[in-house]
Image (cartoon, grey):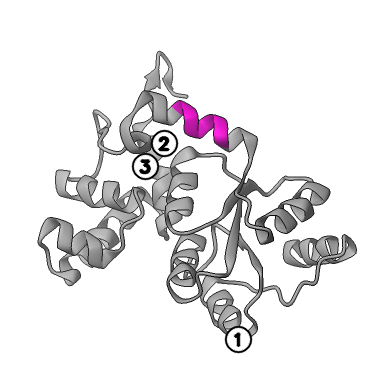
């Protein structure tokens, strides 16, 4: 229903919508076939999430521009999405008129980032290096090695790049990732990045904010 509403809303504002799809793998496949100017990509999807799909499109079709949308205004997610190759990052509650204009601007080569996300990015860059990467909570279910792997995921590294970085086998990296996902209760890289940001968030007098 959400995809249909978005498709109809953009079409009503003069944009040609080629297709709407349920997951990132389908998006990559149809982009290769149709070669659209812009892909409006949900960050959180089953199977291949928005970060993975964006990275794959950047590798295979660098001329296709990706505009990520998400419910979150988390700076760490935005950074990973942009590092993966996205041309913009907007919240899902963005007004349809604004979103349609953002699609046109993205097609024209402009970078579109939600002002709230920009503010969060600036705050994170001021406070910590690489949007919090390297910080550890006092108490965590993850081992030191798992935190190193999670930090690498948070800056957008692939499993192959993590294996090279830490001189590990690819199977070992995948085992660490599986363990991380299980321990923090997530199912994708995007969800893991959001969870890591919550784990790093300083606790106030009554606990985490």
Q: For the residues marked 2 and 1, what is the alpha-carbon distance in whole angstroms? A: 39 Å
Say whether marks 3 and 2 touch (CB < 8 Å): yes
- State the residue in front, 183 or 7: 7
User: Closer to the N terminus: mark 3 or mark 1?
Assistant: 1
User: Would residue 182 be found to the left or right of residue 6 on screen?
Assistant: left
Of the two numbered discs 2 and 1 in the rendering, the one whose residue sits closer to the viewer: 1
Q: Mark 3 touching mark 1, by CB under 8 A? A: no
Residue 196 is tagged as: 3
Helix, strand, or loop for circle 2?
helix
| Magenta stretch prevailing secondary structure | helix
Q: Which residue lies furthest to the top in this view?
A: 205
- Secondary structure of residue under mark 3: helix
Residue behind mark 1 = 33
Queried whether the magenta region covers residue 120, the answer comes back as yes
Q: Nearer the viewer, mark 3 or mark 1?
A: 1
* Residue at horizontal 60 percent and vertical 86 percent from the top: 33
| Left or right side of 9 for 195 | left
Q: In this view, does 73 lie above or below 39?
A: above
71 or 10, which is in the foreground? 10
View extreme (right): residue: 12
Quadrant into which the N terminus falls:
bottom right
Which range of residues does the magenta coloring cover? Answer: 118-123
**Residue pointed to by mark 2:** 198
């Amino acid at each position: 229903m959400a995809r249909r509403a978005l498709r109809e809303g953009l079409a009503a504002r003069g944009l040609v919508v080629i297709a709407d799809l349920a997951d990132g793998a389908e998006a990559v496949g149809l982009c290769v076939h149709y070669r659209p100017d812009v892909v409006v990509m949900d960050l959180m999807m089953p199977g291949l999430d928005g970060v993975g799909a964006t990275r794959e499109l950047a590798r295979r079709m660098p001329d296709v521009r990706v505009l990520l949308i998400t419910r979150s205004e988390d700076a760490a997610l935005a950074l990973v999405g942009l590092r993966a190759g996205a041309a913009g990052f907007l919240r899902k509650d963005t007004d349809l008129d604004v979103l349609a204009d953002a699609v046109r601007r993205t097609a024209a080569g402009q970078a579109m980032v939600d002002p709230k996300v920009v503010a969060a990015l600036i705050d994170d860059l001021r406070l910590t290096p690489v949007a919090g990467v390297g910080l550890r909570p006092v108490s965590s279910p993850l081992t030191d090695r798992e935190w190193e792997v999670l930090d690498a995921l948070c800056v957008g590294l692939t499993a192959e790049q993590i294996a090279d970085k830490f001189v590990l086998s690819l199977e070992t990296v995948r085992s660490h990732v599986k363990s991380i996902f299980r321990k923090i209760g997530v199912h994708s890289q995007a969800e893991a990045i959001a969870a890591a940001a919550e784990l790093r968030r300083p606790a106030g007098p009554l606990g985490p904010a």
